[in-house]
Amino acid sequence: MQVIGTANGRTVPHDAAPTDEEQAALHKTMFAYAGTYSVEAGKVTHHVDISWNEVWNGTDQVRFYEINGNTLALSCRFINPANGTEAQYVVTWEKVSSMHSGTVLTEIGAF
């Protein structure tokens, strides 16, 4: 599995090569990691192999999930890297039918 998350209203660099300040602002408003996962009732654990933050490599990131009809919500609480405060993050997807490709999973909201 792979995860990439970004904040709303991120800095847009003025050029193809961001300044040091722009680059720092971009880094503070995103996260990314990849690895394997395991699932238990109401909980998915991401076993991180590689991450934007080397500290996360080799760690387990626990997320809680809820399936409600055609929606799947993942949630977690951790320290917001942009401002150092604890925050709850929730991402929700809705399973929708497509006339051409069967079933697709579409993100409908993130907080």
Image (tube, rainbow, N blue to C red):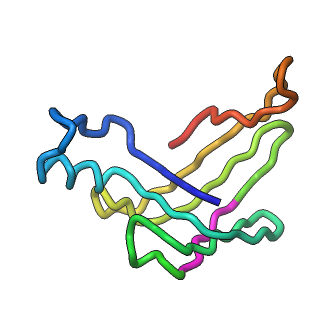
Picture coordinates of residue 14 (x, y %)?
15, 33
Taking the magenta stretch, the answer to whether it contains residue 50 is: no
The answer to whether residue 12 is above or below residue 1 is above
Residue reaching furthest to the top:
99
* Residue at x-position 21% and y-position 51%: 23
* Residue at x-position 40% and y-position 64%: 52
Taking the magenta stretch, the answer to whether it contains residue 63 is: yes
Q: Which residues are magenta?
A: 59-64
Which quarter of the image is occupied by the N terminus? bottom right
Picture coordinates of residue 93 (x, y %)?
69, 39
Name the magenta segment's main secondary structure: strand
Determine whether, in the image, residue 57 is placed left or right of residue 53. right
Q: Residue 37 is drawn in which quadrant?
A: bottom right
* Residue at x-position 64% and y-position 36%: 107
Picture coordinates of residue 16 (x, y %)?
21, 37
Near-viewer residue (104 or 107): 104
The answer to whether residue 66 is above or below residue 64 is above
